[in-house]
């Protein structure tokens, strides 16, 4: 069985009420749930939240509500802890083996069923992998361009520039640069065993 687990909490301070904001006629949080619902591989969808309003919207899109404890619904709480808690609640509800868990955020409107399916298919094709994550290509933010401020207040390369043999000021000279954007993860259950 393949399950999806979305998380969203009520108390956002950066953009209050973001999960309910309308985006093309739907609440923002509908999009990751719709992606999971229309995936070829996801069998059940779960939603971990501290909000009855978020839970109600989730039910409209096929998600089963997992009550999240208060201590995991603060701005200081780590997403990984909320995901781990949600996974253990899923284990109590699901009979049989779980092949993969797709981890989603309620504010992740750009996730598609195809991205979820591709992550599951990558794991099926290579049993040595434990997870797949969405990435974005940002050549303008390559390691070659990264800087830090040293103890003297000077801007210095974050990575020694001699590591890049043929790099120039052309932002594409060192090849494509990918960042894990963490919009969605597809993981094997053993990833929660820590």
Image (tube, rainbow, N blue to C red):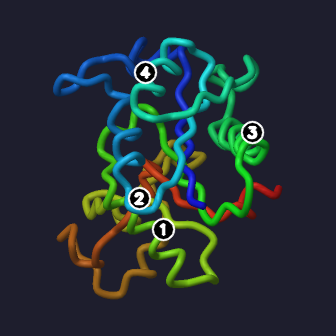
- Separation (CA) of disc 1 from disc 2: 6 Å
Are the two marked residues, 1 and 2, in contact with CB atoms closer than 8 angstroms?
yes
Q: Between disc 3 and disc 1, whose residue precedes? A: 3
Which residue matches tag 2? 116
Q: Secondary structure at mark 4?
A: helix
- Image coordinates of residue 59 in percent, x first then y, are 47, 26
**156 left or right, relative to 11:** left
Quick one: label 3 or label 4, which is nearer the N terminus? 4
**In the picture, which quadrant includes the C terminus?**
bottom right
Dots 2 and 4: beta carbons under 8 Å? Answer: no
Where residue 159 appears, x then y in whole percent? 49, 67
Nearest the camera: 62 or 55? 62
Residue, x 67% and y 61% (percent of image)? 98
Find disc 3 in the rendering and name its residue.
89
Residue designated by label 1: 120
Q: Which residue is mark 4?
A: 57
Query: Contact (CB < 8 A) between labels 2 and 3?
Result: no
């Amino acid at each position: 069985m393949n399950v999806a687990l979305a998380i969203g909490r009520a108390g956002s301070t950066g953009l209050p009420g973001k999960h309910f904001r309308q985006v093309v006629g739907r609440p923002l949080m509908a999009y990751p749930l719709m992606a999971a619902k229309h995936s070829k591989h996801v069998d059940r969808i779960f939603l971990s939240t501290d909000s009855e309003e978020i839970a109600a919207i989730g039910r409209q899109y096929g998600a089963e509500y997992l009550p999240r404890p208060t201590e995991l619904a603060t701005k200081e709480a780590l997403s990984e802890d909320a995901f781990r808690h949600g996974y253990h609640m899923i284990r109590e509800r699901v009979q049989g083996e779980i092949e993969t868990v797709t981890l989603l955020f309620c504010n992740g409107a750009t996730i598609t069923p195809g991205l979820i399916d591709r992550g599951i298919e990558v794991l099926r094709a290579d049993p040595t992998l434990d997870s797949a994550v969405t990435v974005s290509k940002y050549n303008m933010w390559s390691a070659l361009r990264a800087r830090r401020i040293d103890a003297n207040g000077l801007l210095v390369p974050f990575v020694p520039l001699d590591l890049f043999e043929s790099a120039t000021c052309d932002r594409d000279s060192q090849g494509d640069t990918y960042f894990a954007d963490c919009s969605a993860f597809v993981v094997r259950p053993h990833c929660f065993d820590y």
